[in-house]
Amino acid sequence: MISVIIPHLNQPEALARGLAALNAQQGVSLPYEIIVVDNGSHELPAEICAKWENVTLLVQPVPGPGPARNLGAATASGDILAFIDADCVAAPSWLAAIERHFDEVPDDMLIGGDVRILQGNPDRLTMLEAYESVFAFRMKKYIEEKGFTGGGNLAVRAWVFRKVGDFLGINIAEDTEWGMRASAMGYRVRYEPTMIVHHPARRNFPELAAKWDRHIAHDLGEIRHFDNWRRRWMLRALAVLVSPIAEVPRIIASDRLKGLRSRGLAMVGVVRIRVYRGISMLAAALGDVDSRTAARWNRS
């Protein structure tokens, strides 16, 4: 059996869309259950979950996707745990790709797949859709070069999850830390390109900025352990500020964009976000950083 685990927080419409996609999976022969773990929503998605016989709704009051995923894993019945986020839409063959990979490569214990942007109208992308289609969720790079994948498209044998242990809490990039911990224990993550989920682009620039605020807070906490960290951090910030010019070839060559308009929008997006990141990093180096930033998962 495959146990699909979904942390949820105040995203009822997205959850309903995601559950519909999961219940329309094709080509999977193993039975599967779906466990939704609510993490403090204003209203429990009980009515949404009740539409599907194979969906169980749990409640995890401890904030953060990590604790929510941990509760789902602790109650799962499957031999394989498949993690996906509430706002993601699984491709029709997502579960079949997971099943096939573990059948064909029995020595693999942990796999991650491709995360693509859910484009509202591929012929008229927004700036954020164009930007994130190129620069967001570069899972193949993360898996092959850094040894981790995102918790929104991750599958692991259940006994391996128990060996590695739980995801950590909200004040750390929990999926990154978990993946690197698994790799250090010898359970290296493998990339499966046919294991595809679609993630919506951020709705507006402040949402994208909030994502980078969290990353900056996490990265700053790590680099502060090193000598001369402030100089290293400021050099990194300056590198971010001048980096957009190096991204022109990637934007031109991307197979996830069509036409000059979408490529122009992607370039505008990368300039805007890199300037924001660089300035925010410089401000953080000077002590102007909100220590609560990392605790903002999509909580208002």
Image (cartoon, grey):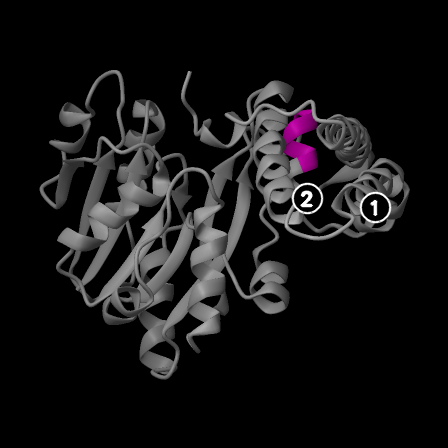
* Left or right, 167 with reference to 201: left
**Main secondary structure along the magenta-highlighted residues:** helix
Q: Is residue 276 visible?
A: yes
- Place of residue 17 in the rendered image (x, y in percent of width and height, measured from the top left): 33, 32
| Quadrant assignment, res 181 | bottom left
Q: Which mark is residue 135?
A: 2
Under circle 1, the secondary element is: helix
Q: Which mark is residue 13?
A: none
Q: Which residues are magenta?
A: 126-131
* Left or right, 49 with reference to 24: left
**Kind of residue at badge 1:** Glu
Q: Where's the N terminus, which quadrant? A: bottom left
Residue beneath the point at 21% across and 35% down: 60
| Quadrant assignment, res 106 | bottom left
**Kind of residue at badge 2:** Phe
Q: Does residue 5 sit above or below 118 in this rendering?
A: below
User: Of callouts 1 and 2, which one flags the residue occurring earlier in the amino acid sequence?
Assistant: 2
Residue beneath the point at 22% across and 30% down: 61
Q: Does residue 81 sit above or below 101 in this rendering?
A: above
Along the viewing direction, whichever of 206 and 105 lies nearer the viewer: 206
Along the viewing direction, whichever of 199 and 296 lies nearer the viewer: 296
- Count residues near mark 2 (Cα–Cα under 10 Å), then give few for <14, some for 14-19, many for 20+: some
Is residue 56 located in the magenta-colored stretch of the structure? no
